[in-house]
Amino acid sequence: MIDLHSHTRFSDGSTTPAELICLAASAGARAVAITDHDTVDGLPEGRRAAQESGIEFVDGVEISADFQPGTMHILGYCFDPSSKELNLALEKLRVARSERNPQIASRLRALGLEVHYDEVVGLAGNEVVGRPHFARVMVTKGYVASIKEAFDRFLAKGQAAYVEKHRLSPADSIELIRKAGGVAILAHPYQMKLSDEDTEDQIKRLKDQGLDGIEAIYSRLNSVEREKYISLADRLGMLVSGGSDFHGSFKPDISLVTGLGDLQVPYEALGKIKALAALRSRPSLT
Ligand SMILES: [Zn+2]
Ligand SMILES: [Zn+2]
């Protein structure tokens, strides 16, 4: 078995890349991909550790694309991790993310609300800091009566403390991965929060923009849902991928390789991803 979706300390996982590879080895994995959010910085350490453990290592990344109503994450595989364009774009996303929350805090202070970024971080603990944490601090301090009021008056899009998110469009996310020689896969499609019909329409649009496949075999999907996405991929002539979305102790119910216990991602899925990436890197043979 293999696992093509995992996170380390380089984004929001709890383990180092080397520790993750150790876990993959003890789970008997044949291949593993590290897919940290918006960064490829953990890949060299992962690759070194995998070589020592005799596990096949797959370069990966997970990009958060601009999307409503749910979230859209695009996974990239088998790209050139030293691609300048890729690294510059990812760096820009990370800087924007790290600057956004302190900016929200300073806007609130400019509006006369004594909210400091440090206290918001303290309240968030291990969670990724977001606007709900600001809202909770504002409620605690009595500036607003409820989380809803905090959003309605200050934090929602269009309000005075709102700071725009810098995200790539789905098309740009896919293009970035493909230009670096990689294969682009839609992660956990159900998290887009669309109906089955709208999911299919959306995936068709993404396919037109260069998306190669769907992460159909995912920890939090049951076997019926996995089959549904596998047959959708078949129908659209797209690849199937799979992984646990391991985050270490930050999502303790999910194990590497086995997910919630019933995850089985066949090596064949990676074989097809690699074959497509190889074809692209040698266009004269197509
Ligand atoms: Zn994701
Ligand atoms: Zn993930």
Image (cartoon, rainbow, N blue to C red):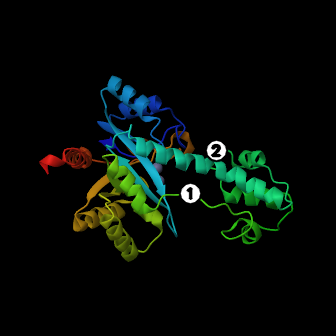
Residue type beneath disc 1 = His
Does residue 230 appear left or right of residue 221 in this picture?
left
Identify which residue is drawn at 23% across, 68% down. 235
Kind of element beneath mark 1: loop
In which quadrant of the rendered view does residue 56 lie? top left
Q: Note whether residue 6 is visible.
A: no
Determine the CA span between mark 1 and mark 2: 23 Å
Residue 194 x, y percent position in the rendering: 45, 72
Please say if 94 is above or below 203: above
Does residue 8 appear left or right of residue 54 in this picture?
right
Residue type beneath disc 2 = Asn
In which quadrant of the rendered view does residue 281 lie? top left
Q: Is mark 1 within 8 Å of ligand 1?
A: no
Residue 162 x, y percent position in the rendering: 69, 63
Residue that mark 2 sits on: 126
Identify which residue is drawn at 75% across, 54% down. 105
Categorize mark 2 by other alpha carbons within 10 Å: few (<14), some (14-19), many (20+): few
Does residue 231 appear left or right of residue 90 in this picture?
left
* Circle nearer the viewer, 1 or 2: 1
Residue 89 x, y percent position in the rendering: 47, 48
Whether tag 1 and tag 2 are in contact, CB under 8 A, the answer is: no
Residue that mark 1 sits on: 166
